[in-house]
Each structure stands twice: as structure tokens, then as C-alpha cells.
Image (tube, helix red, strand yellow):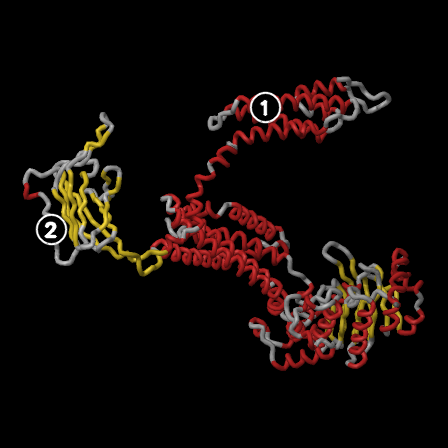
Amino acid sequence: MAISSKPGSDLKKSPVVAGLLSLILPGAGHYYAGKRGQGVLLAIIAVIMVGLTFWARGLREVNLRPDTELILIVTTVGFWLWAIAAAALHAAQRPFFLPMLGLVLILGYFYVLGWQVTEVDLRRFFGEFSDTFDIFSKVIWPWDAAVEYDIANVSATTQFANPCPTNTAEIPAQAGAANGKAWVTLDPACGEFSIYDSSKGAVQVGTMLTLKAGGLKPNTHVDVLWTDALGQQYRPRYNGASVEGTADAQGNLTIQFGAPQIETGTQVGTALHTIEVRQELGRSNPHMSEDMELALNRIIITIFQALMATSFGIVLAVPISFIAARNLMAGSPLTLAIYYAVRFVLNVIRSIEPIIWGVIAVVWVGLGPFAGVIALTLHTIASLAKLYSEAIESIESGPIEAITSTGASPVQVVMHAIVPQVIPPYVSFTIYRWDINVRLATIIGLVGGGGIGQILYQYIGQSRWQSAGLCVWLVAATVSVMDYASAEIRKRFV
Amino acid sequence: MLEVRNLTTVYQDGTKALDNVSFQVPDGAFLAVIGLSGSGKSTLLRCINRLIEPTSGEIMWNGTNVAALKGSELRMARREIGMIFQQFNLVKRSSVMTNVLSGRLGYINPLFSLINYFPADDRRRALAALERVGLTDKINNRADALSGGQQQRVGIARVLMQGVKLLLADEPVSSLDPVLAHSILNQLETLNREDKITVVCSLHYLDLVQRYSSQVLGLRDGKVVFEGDNKAIRQMTPERFKEIYGEEAELVGAGKLSGAEH
């Protein structure tokens, strides 16, 4: 690289010194060459680049890929060399050939490192998107879960003992045909379960059972349900198929199958199992499901939470807004100090997210809607007081002058010159805030603040996506309606 | 009869806005106050109704020293002294009717103001005032929906509600174009002639001063630099006018004068 100073220039600096300085710290050469601001910036960037490289190498969560590490080192070294060349050329007062190269190297470094530490993975992003289809479809179309039906059943039960008790009197009696009612019997009524024999790789079938049932609805499908001693319900399987059948024209059914494969574990003595035959004759009387009813109840509670928080917020924010208004508090150093203190506290409260206030409030008053109300109220006070005080700060003094000049008393001046100016923005801000609070109330439940968020969080935890979908829909509907309503009201009022 | 004696006003920051100002305004006069921005015109007008507290001096209004009044006595005096403003100073979000009614506040019990009540008699009076300024079709409009000229007429209607004997007009036409300026000043002239209301009006344009005023008071740096009657105004040349305004206003003054003729 040919470095020489321009002849006749009085301000020339030595390019060699500039280059050497930049070798020690990029930017130092720029500083020396008179580009002070750029020099400081380059030095800061160089320090950050080196520091981040060491930080990334020490990260335990992220394994830096070797090629990433190489790119980081290459871009850092490249940046270093670029800074040296640039500094030398600046010192020599010659035009620099590649001003953008430095920027490209810096950005390259940060994007490569950022890609790694945030674990961006396009293969997973596109390849595993289909995993969400099931959840998505349930959340987006959850209405099956909104409706429940009364299901008319024909059903009969009997019992089965395992293993066979020594005292034959303990073998469950099989009731047999009953007058017009459904019935079911098992023969034998006790026996051994099937066992999977891993050495043969096959199932060793247990006692062969004959299930007879009658009094069923003719020509209709019959399910068989097996409930073990612990209350677990199974659909027994035999020869790779569910044990089920269809009642004949007389409403009778006979099925033969091997006793199912049921883990008896550490069972002592004889256990009684219940066998049920069941026909579903149809669904009738559609009505709101329990989940839907709960979600509706909770969304109403949520709207009330927003209402309570907004009204508590107004009551406290109005007086605070006066001491947070600069034009009212600029009178003396004392009032100005109060103004700054109040403003500071409001800013701190406002900068803490409502969800964090929610966590604190849950510790404070326990789980439930009240915790959510506290969290929202705190945030509402802080933001409304700020907005209100700004409304006070922006009132015009002209009307005050004019009303005073009519001979009005101070009370009249407040009522006719100040209040009319302040009320519309107050109303507008308040409605806007109520709108925000409805939105916040829906998520404050995530941390235990009651309302719909709480059950939404539970449903997500239980992977009950349809029920979660119901909550999501109700939240979306409520927020949209509030959004529209508040915009309309504000438009008319202001 | 308004008589100002040795009026001096010094602001908190030490600015001497008015320096020993004395003048008389006979009943029924139309006094134009002229001078550069910052010469003390607005301060003088606001001292007369005590929107600004004078530092020393007397403001004799029909035998009472307004400068010494306090509390309800001051408010009683203010009822007789109406004021209209360059920026109209209406409550923008309130209706025209409400703005006009507020001129009556000095006469009604402050407790009524808490419930925004005005007696029916006052409403009739407000309608009459609006009729007089030609705004009966705008009664329920919001004040800020009106044009500048209309807003100033609402300001005049508000003053009419007070039953004023003295009208202070602080650059009432400076925010308006020349045609509207004449319309507003015509109304002030009507009030001056028909209702015998004394008018003290600060004005910028010499032609308006010559056309409407019966007396002129020139202020410069808070001091009276010119006093003259109708005859003196007629004879006042643009050059003399410029003396009051100062050399730096020369070109602007000439431009404004010619602009206002059309």
C-alpha cells in the first residue's frame, strides 16, 4: 500500500504513525488524523467486537460452531486492517478507496454472531412448521368445544374377577336377561389377563371370555368398555382389533375375546373389574359446554377488572395530575421539587410492565382477580396521571384571561375556562386507558391475576387447545369491540 | 371618563413595560393606542382591567380608582369594562352560546356555575347579542368551528352580555384579513356611537386608526410619545406614524399601510 503525504499540505500527519496507532487500537489513527468523532466510534466498536468474541467463546448455552468462530476472527482482523489503512490514508489526506468495507465487516460480524446466539434455525422454522397445524386448527376453530350434547345411551355392566378367587362365592354373579332392560354377562366371570411374552415376541392370550348381552337396540353398534380396579377405563383389544360388535335383530350380542392385557403390578388378592356394553343412540339437546360457560364468565370478570382498575386509577390520577403539571408547579422551588419527585415516581411505576406488577400483587393479596385489579390500577394511575397532567399543561391561558375580564369569580374561572378545556382530553384518555386495561386484563391472568388469562394459561398447560381457542376468541372479540367503541366515543367527544 | 395617572408597570424580570403613562379618555371616545410590538400596548390595556397588576399609578374610572380595588369590588368594576382579544380567547370546545353566556358570569351566583346554570333571562340576552353580531345561525356550533371573523364577533357578543361602558380591544383585527378587519371595527364603531361605549383599542394600521378613532395615544418603550385628537390623526402623515413606530418598522409599516387600502 503506497502511503505518502500530499505535498504542500500544512496539516499533514504522518501516515505511518496513524497506521501504527490504529494497529494498537482501531480509531486511534483516525483520532490522530483529525477525525475525532469517527476515531472514538471505531475504538468503541473494536472493543465491543473483541469483547463479544471472548464472551461468545465462553458461553455455555451456545456452542459456537468452528466456522462461526473463524468468521468472527476474520471479520475482526479485517476490520482492524481496514481501520489501519483508513487511518493512514486519512493522515496522508488521500481519498480512501473503500469506505463501505469497514461497515460491511462490522455488520457481518454482528449478524454472524447474532445468528448463532439467538439460535436462528431456518431448517426448523420451515421444516417443523407442520407440527403446529394441529394446535393451530384447534385454536382457530374451537367451536366443537363450545357445545355439548346430551347423549342417550343404552348401557349395562357386569363384573369380572382377576385372578380367580379361591372361594367360588367371591366370583361375581352374572345377572343375565332382565325384563326389557339391557343386560350383559361374562363367561367365565374370572380368569387371567393376556401377557406379552417378550421372549417369543407374541401375546400369550389369557382366559377366553364369552360376552353375551341382550335388551339392546337392534342392529346398532355396541362398544365394550373395561374399567379396572383403579378406575382406569380401556377399550379392550383382541387379535389387533377393538372388541366391539353390532346387536342383532333381537337386540342380542355375543362376542368372544381373550381377557385383555392389563398390568396387575403389585396387586394382592383378587380385584374386581367392571365391563360395560354401551350403545350411543344419538346426541340431543345441544347446550353450552362447561368450558364455554367458564370462558364467558371469566371474560365478564375480566371486563369488570378493567372497569375497576380504570375507575380506581381515575380517582387517584386526577389529584396527582395537578401536582404533576409543570405549569401549575413551576411557581416555587419547593413545588418544582414535588413536581420532579412525582414525575419520577410515575415514570418508575409506568416503566414496570403490568405483568410484573401482577406477580407482585399475587404475592401481596393472593391469586385471583383482585391481584389483577391492583396490578392494572397501579399502571393506570401512573399513565393517566401523566396524560392528565399533560392535558393541564397544554391549556390555553387566553380563555382564563377572557373569563376573568368579565368579572367572574375564581370558581367561575375554573368552571368556565379551565374545566371545559381539560374535560375532553380527560375523557378521551380515560376511555383509551379502559381500552388498554381490557387488553391487559386478559393477559394479567397468566401470572395468576384472575380473569380469562388464568384459565387460558391452564388450558395451554393442559394442551386443551380447543378450550384455549375459545378463550382466545373471546379475548379477540372483546378487545375488538372495545377498540372500536373507544375510538368512536373519543371521536365524538373530542 | 377614564383617566390614567402616572401608570408604571415593572415585570418580575425587571422589564419596565409602562413608564409613567398618563392620559384621559372622555366618555364616548374611540381611543386608538398605537406602537410597536413590545411598546406596552397590551400591558396598558390589561392594567386597566387589572389582568396585569400595575406597579404604581392610578386608573380612575368614573371616579373610582380601579388600581386600588380588591375582590368583589374589582369584579364589579370588571363587569363594566369588557375586553376583546387578538386571539379571540374563546373556550374553543364550548358552543357559541356557552361562550356568549360566560360574559354574564359577573352577575350570577358562583354556585350556579358549578352546575353550569344560567337564568332564562340571560339566555334571551345572549340570543339578542348574537343577533346583533349576526351569528344566530351558529348558536350551537363549537367555537373552534367558526372562522376568525366569526370568533371575534362571538367575543363582541360576550362583551355585550356584560353591559359594558368601556371596551378594551387588544389588537382585535391583527389576526384577520383587511376586509374582516373593517367589519369588526365597524361593529366597534356602532357600539361606540349607538351604545355610547367608550373604546380603547390598540391598532396597527394607520388607515384604520384614521378611519375609526377619535383620539390616538402613541407608545414607545412604555412611554407616551404621541397624544392627539381626531384632527391630529387626520393630519398625521405616514412619516409621523413611522416616528412612533421607529425607524426599523419603516418598510413594514409602509407595506402594511398600502396593503390595508385594498
Q: How far, Cα to Cα, is label 1 from label 2?
A: 81 Å
* Up/down of A455 relative to B48, above or below: above
Answer whether labels 1 and 2 touch (C-beta < 8 Å). no
Q: What residue is rendered at 85% in x and 20% in y?
A: A7
Circle 1 packing at 10 Å, graded few (<14), some (14-19), many (20+), is: some
- Image quarter for residue B235? bottom right
Image side of residue B20 versus residue A262, left or right:
right
Residue A93 is left or right of residue A238, and the answer is: right
Local secondary structure at mark 2: loop
Image-based side of B75 in relation to B6, left or right: left
Give the residue furthest to the front: A249
Q: Is residue A100 above or below residue A216?
A: above
Q: Secondary structure at mark 1?
A: helix
Q: Position of residue B141 (x, y in %)?
A: 66, 71
| Nearer to me, A302 or A132 | A132
Task: Rate crowding at label 2 as few (under 14), some (14 to 19) or many (20 or more) other CA atoms within 10 Å.
Answer: few
- Measured along the vertical axis of the image, is residue A282 above or below residue A16? below
Which one is nearer the viewer's eye here, A266 or B250? A266
Which image quarter holds the C terminus of chain A? bottom right
Q: Which residue is mark 1?
A: A71
Q: At x 38% / y 55%, what residue is drawn?
A: A146
Q: Are marks 1 and 2 on the same chain?
A: yes
Q: Chain of mark 1?
A: A
> Pointer 2: what residue?
A175
- Specify whether residue A363 is in view: no
Give residue A351's position: percent from left, percent from top: 53, 46
Q: Position of residue B16 (x, y in %)?
A: 78, 58
- What amino acid is at disc 1? Ile
> Which callout, 1 or 2, points at the residue further toward the start of the chain?
1
| Image coordinates for residue B211, horizontal then vertical, percent | 87, 72
